[in-house]
Amino acid sequence: MFGKKEKPKEPEGFIKRLRARINRGENWLAYDLVNLVPGGKIDDSVLEELESLLVMADVGVDTTELIINDLRQGLARNELQDLDALRAGLERSLLNILEPVERPLVIEKTDGPFVIFLVGVNGAGKTTTIGKLAHRFLDEGHTVMLAAGDTFRAAAVEQLQVWGERNDIPVIAQQSGADPAAVIFDAWLAAKARNINVLLVDTAGRLQNQTSLMNELAKMKRVVARHDETAPHEIMLVLDSSQGQNALIQAEKFHETLGLTGISVTKLDGSAKGGILFAIANRLHVPVRFIGIGEAIDDMQPFCAKEFVTAMLSSGDKDQ
Ligand SMILES: Nc1nc2c(ncn2[C@@H]2O[C@H](COP(=O)(O)OP(=O)(O)OP(=O)(O)O)[C@@H](O)[C@H]2O)c(=O)[nH]1
Ligand SMILES: [Mg+2]
């Protein structure tokens, strides 16, 4: 997979990979746009077809409407003369939605560790994202510790320990079935005692409608705040982009219960078309922190609106 000392790859490499992977499987907008406009003339029916493409790509009905209305106004002003103009108009409109949520995570100086909770449904990619984040933060010169707050799923602690070993960092864990709030309480003390900058907290996967499990997260939050009232400093929802509109429902519910401060989106390399980011940006306004395009440690980068939109609108080099 990767060596411990391996550095994250160059950002240009990542954009290329994003472009190649996001267009994997069925082509997205770049290919479809050309086919929508065979004669080169943009009219209402082209915009209607684009509308259904956007909805099918998980952009969501409200957000799609916003984009299409924007383009309709451009059409009325005679600004959409050809495919290039349509592409430019679409790019502007997509950027208008995504740019406000491009707010990178900044590790601030705190009295005690900067505490990051990773939350989300089962299998979203929380633990893997922790491994990737730990690698990134170490690379940036931080000291990092992991807390095994998933005491529920068998082998969850071991999985986190593997990431700890790979990154050569300590993992604070208790036995399976322990109260996750107690794990976090201890982990904070251990991190403080060792002067650790960043404490990454793994949590068990849970569905947004499992009230008692959602309350458990709220309790973890209260417990860590007893040590440091500014903690947790980040409550990051990890969302599997291949879940489509369901991911939006998850995000809304987690936000309502916990007050999310960031969202990271995983598995953009699969069948997902990436439109879910627009739905989330338009509906929730929660910063999008990182995007993941694979299982390897460098398959994650801070979210950049411009890169993302460029990747969606270009056909990319699919064979990479
Ligand atoms: N293709 C792809 N796979 C990913 C990505 N992120 C995570 N995965 C895979 O998704 C699976 C689940 O990841 P985990 O990190 O265990 O997910 P989790 O949210 O911790 O799962 P639970 O602890 O069971 O709730 C693993 O096989 C990961 O390798 C990604 O960006 N792309
Ligand atoms: Mg996990």
Image: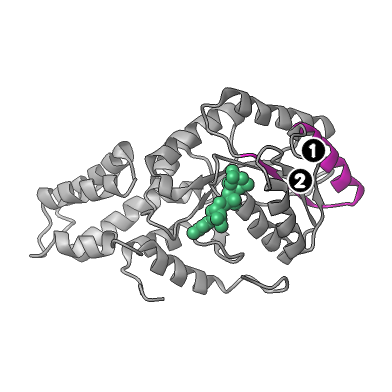
Where is residue 313 shown, x and y percent of the image? 32, 62
Secondary element under disc 2, as helix, strand or loop, is strand
- Whether the residues at callouts 2 and 1 have beta carbons within 8 Å, the answer is yes
Q: Quadrant of the N terminus?
A: bottom right
User: Residue 147, which numbered label?
Assistant: 2
**Amino acid beneath label 2:** Ala
The stretch drawn in magenta includes residue 195: yes
Q: Which residues are magenta?
A: 181-204
Q: Secondary structure at mark 1?
A: helix
Where is residue 291? Give x, y as percent.
52, 56
Q: Which residue is mark 1?
A: 183
Tell me which residue sits at (37%, 76%) in the image.
319
Is residue 23 shown above or below 233? Answer: below
Examine the rendered structure and indicate whether residue 236 appears above or below residue 253.
below
> Does residue 55 appear to the left or right of 204 in the view shown?
left
Identify the disc placed on residue 306. Answer: none
In the image, residue 23 above or below residue 50: below
Residue occupying the point 62% across, 28% down = 213
